[in-house]
Amino acid sequence: MELRSIKDKIPEKLYGILEKEIKTLRPAQEKSVKNGLLDRKSLLVCTPTASGKTLIAELAALKNILNGNGKAIYIVPLKALASEKYKDFKKRYEGIAKVALSIGDFDSNDSHLIDYDLIITTSEKLDSLIRHHAPWLSLISTIIIDEIHLLNDAERGPTLEILITVLRQLLKKAQIIGLSATIGNPEELASWLDAELVVDDWRPVKLHKGVYFDGEVEFG
C-alpha cells in the first residue's frame, strides 16, 4: 500500500512530514489501516521487531491530535526507552504537535502537561499521575501501550494491568493501540482490550534459526 493512498485520511501537516521519509506502508501498517486504525478503532498489533509498529501508533496519535480529538499518551516500560521516543517524536513532529516527557517526580501531577499534545511516560509514572488526579488526563483520546506483553511479567505486569483497567474506565472513548513483538495469547488479549487484532510475520531482515555447537552453526 502506497502512503499516498491514505493521503485523504490523515491531516495534511502529518502527510507532509511522512511523505519525506515513507513511500510504501509495511504489511502490518497496511493491515492496521484496513482494520480501522484511522477510524479510531482500538488495535492490538503483534508483529516482529522493526516491522513498523511505532508508525502505526504515530498515525493514530497525530491524527487525533491534529483533528482536535485530544491528547495522546505513549506508555513504555523503561525510562531510557521513554527518553528515546521523546527525542524521536520531538524531532519528527516539531511544529505540528507539542511533545513532552514525563518520567520524573512520582509525587507530582505534572499539571504543566495540559499544554502538551503527545506525552511519553512509563507505566509507573502514569500510575502516579492518576493517583495525583492530573487534571489533563480527561483530555486523552489516544492510549498507546508499547511492549504490552509485559502484562505477563511478574514485576511490571500487575501495575500495567491495573493501569490499563483504570484508563479504560476513565477514558471510555479513547482509542487504544497495544504494541508487541511476542504475545502468547493475542486473541484473548485483544478481546479484553475490545480491540481488533493485527498479526503479521513480515520483518525487514529474514530471521534464520540455527544451533551453534563446536564452532559451527547448523540451520534447520
Image (tube, grey):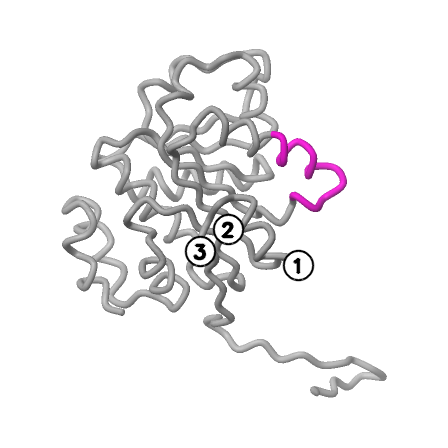
Query: In this figure, which residue is indicated by the disc labeled 3?
Result: 53
Residue 120 image label: none
Query: In this figure, which residue is indicated by the disc labeled 1?
Result: 184
CA separation in Å, label 3 and label 1: 18 Å
CA separation in Å, label 2 and label 3: 7 Å
The amino acid type found where label 2 is placed reads Leu
Residue drawn 60% across and 38% down? 78
The reply to whether the C-beta atoms of the residues labelled 3 and 1 are less than 8 Å apart is no
Residue 179 image label: 2
At label 2, counting other C-alpha atoms closer than 10 Å, the crowd grade (few under 14, some 14-19, many 20 or more) is many
Q: Is residue 147 above or below residue 159?
A: below
User: What's the magenta region?
Assistant: 151-162
- Viewer-proximal residue, 144 or 80? 144
The image quadrant where one finds the C terminus is bottom right
Which image quadrant is residue 114 in?
A: top left
The amino acid type found where label 3 is placed reads Lys
Q: Secondary structure at mark 1?
A: loop
Sequence-wise, the earlier of marks 1 and 2 is 2
Sequence-wise, the earlier of marks 3 and 1 is 3
Q: Is residue 20 left or right of residue 77?
A: left
CA separation in Å, label 1 and label 2: 13 Å
Residue 40 in percent (x, y) is at 32, 44
